[in-house]
Amino acid sequence: MTNEPEIEVTVLLPCLNEAETLEVCVRKALRSLRECGVDGEVLVSDNGSTDGSQEIAERAGARVVHAPVRGYGGALQFGIDQARGRYVIMADADDSYALSELGPFVEALRAGHDVVMGNRFRGGIAPGAMPPLHRYLGNPVLSWLGRRLFGLREVRDFHCGMRGFNTERIRALGLCMPGMEFASELVVRAALAGYDIVEVPTTLSPDGRSRPPHLRTWRDGWRHLRFLLVFAPRKTLVRPGATLAALGLAGVGALTPGPLSLGPVRLDVSTLVYACLMVLVGVQLVLFGGLAEIYGRQERLAPQRASDRWIRLLRLETSVTVGLLLLVAGTAGTVGAVAYWGLDGFGDLNPHDTLRVVLPSATAIALGVVVLFSGLVGSLLTLRPTHPTPPITRQPTPTHDRLVTNH
């Protein structure tokens, strides 16, 4: 690669049977690069087309590479690996994105921004270009979630398929999602890494193909939503779980001594049952969130700062100690309840009295087991072999060698 001329921008088009629109996309991108005075290339990352898309792209002036991993994300990851440009501008090959207007993306990238997102709502959406379900529900909801979960205040069109980025900065993230959720992964991982993300207006035109799009509304929408939720365990698991556990503990503390009257409402044993359940569910959510943070750190999917704390908290020794203390406390309460029952000849007891001891004791035993085994799982997640794993050969890339796996 050292003998090749320096390329500033690679326009990357993922492709799977796009013979109808691929040529016009390539020609628009090449013309726009010339108009912007940019030394660039158009790279088509083919995902196994059987309609002659590869030959069409090459005749139009593009370079074609063959992605070994199927899926939208698989094609884009391989294309990013093979890109020769300092910057990459990616877009779909269906002639819906403004490949003839690359200037705003190039200018923002030259200004030093790491990721430049297109905003179709600011630039303009032509009639029939976006289904109403996507325009008024899917995109607004998922974009709002992205802003709330990851602090992406500047991103109003979270799933715009046209975006640019600094090639090396994105390669450094180690992106790995093979499907449509790759679009979310790129933005989320960039935000978690503290990258500078901005938006520029862009337009959306109707799909130029006669066949249905690859995108499936509910399936791919759910995959995007799932990715957003599991990638923010602190906000989706830890904080809700801590709130639920705190409310449950307050209820247990208030109702264990006796009934509680709040004006005309009288809370008794039935409410205590749900309070104990809130404690149990809340603590499990917190622990699951902690384990998710540890997993994210070990797989280099999330920042290490928060997960270091969880590694200390969920050390096997710490978890065993806390778990055993809870088991002892729960067992002591159970023994006391059985002894009290024995004093009455193991006959019928007033449940309003005995359940005030039995329920918190059973909850403590359950929590002890959960905490103990959570520590075991947390310790397993932090284990790493001392011997190197066998290398997996693959086509070398210009600047680094990264494995793309199909999860």
Image (tube, helix red, strand yellow):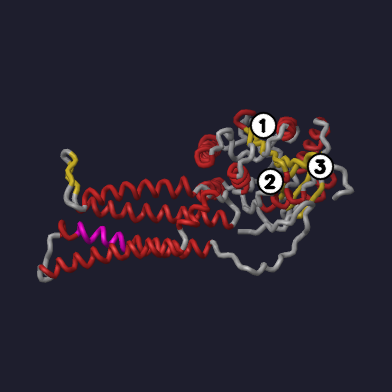
Measured from the top left, where is residue 218 in percent x and y? 53, 47
Residue at label 2? 170
Q: Are marks 1 and 2 in contact (CB under 8 Å)?
A: no
Quick check: can you spot residue 218?
Answer: no
Q: Viewed as shown, does residue 399 lie left or right of 357?
A: right
Residue at label 3? 41
Q: Viewed as shown, does residue 123 lie left or right of 369?
A: right
Highlighted range, magenta = 355-365
Residue at label 1? 202
Neighbourhood count class around disc 1 (C-alpha, 10 Å): few under 14, some 14–19, many 20 upward: many
Query: From what the image shows, is residue 128 above or below residue 299?
Result: above
- Select label 1 or label 2 by which is in front: 2
**Residue 116 image-quadrant placement:** top right
Neighbourhood count class around disc 2 (C-alpha, 10 Å): few under 14, some 14–19, many 20 upward: many
Query: From what the image shows, is residue 219 above or below residue 377?
Result: above
Is residue 357 rendered magenta in the image? yes
- Between the C-alphas of marks 1 and 2, the distance is 22 Å
- Between the C-alphas of marks 1 and 3, the distance is 21 Å
